[in-house]
Amino acid sequence: MKLFDLYILLIILIKICYLVTVILKKMDLSKKTKETVDYYHTKLHVLFYLSMGILLVILFNPFIKEAKVSGHEKIFIFILGVLMIIDIVKRYVKNSSFLNDNNKIETSIHIVNELLEII
């Protein structure tokens, strides 16, 4: 099995786990269990979103000749994937609890915003 196939299976597994959290959120659970389910629900959503962005970049990389689309569509879909990845990184840096220095957070957000304006 190719590495790409394993990556697709990983994405499917992430989505299945996410769907399980959706079902669990609708059930009558204790407060502590609901908090845990909400935590994993959010993390799995972000992980799925990030993995789909990476998949788009892999599939529609304009610098590789093996992509299934061509021309402007190839470039637009590649940029969409890059923007998805940048958006996730921006959200993670902005909401990160491991960075206590506000200057680091502001600098990171500024860099990401500059990258978005360039693209």
Image: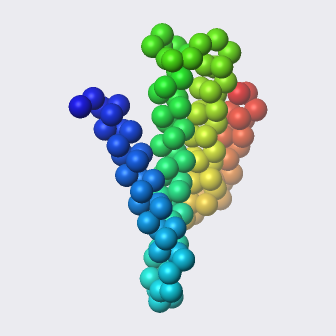
Q: Quadrant of the N terminus?
A: top left
- Look at the picture and state if 103 lies above or below 97: above
Q: Tell me which corner region of the image, top left, top right, bottom left or bottom right, holds residue 81.
A: top right
- Look at the picture and state if 10 lies above or below 58: below
Number of numbered discs on residues: 0
- Look at the picture and state if 45 lies above or below 5: below
Question: Residue 67: where, in percent of width, then height?
Answer: 49, 17
The answer, for residue 108, to whether it is visible in the render is no
Q: Quadrant of the C terminus?
A: top right
The answer, for residue 41, to whether it is visible in the render is yes
Question: Residue 74: where, in percent of width, then height?
Answer: 61, 19
Image point 42% across, 57% down: which residue?
A: 16
Question: Residue 13: where, in percent of width, then height?
Answer: 37, 52
Horizontally, is 52 left or right of 112 in the view?
Answer: left
Q: Extreme bottom residue here?
A: 30
Image point 49% across, 71% down: which residue?
A: 23
Image point 52% across, 29% down: which residue?
A: 57
Horizontally, is 52 left or right of 80 in the view?
Answer: left
Question: Residue 3: where, in percent of width, then height?
Answer: 30, 32
- Look at the picture and state if 34 lies above or below 61: below
Horizontally, is 16 left or right of 27 in the view?
Answer: left
Image point 67% across, 24% down: which residue?
A: 76
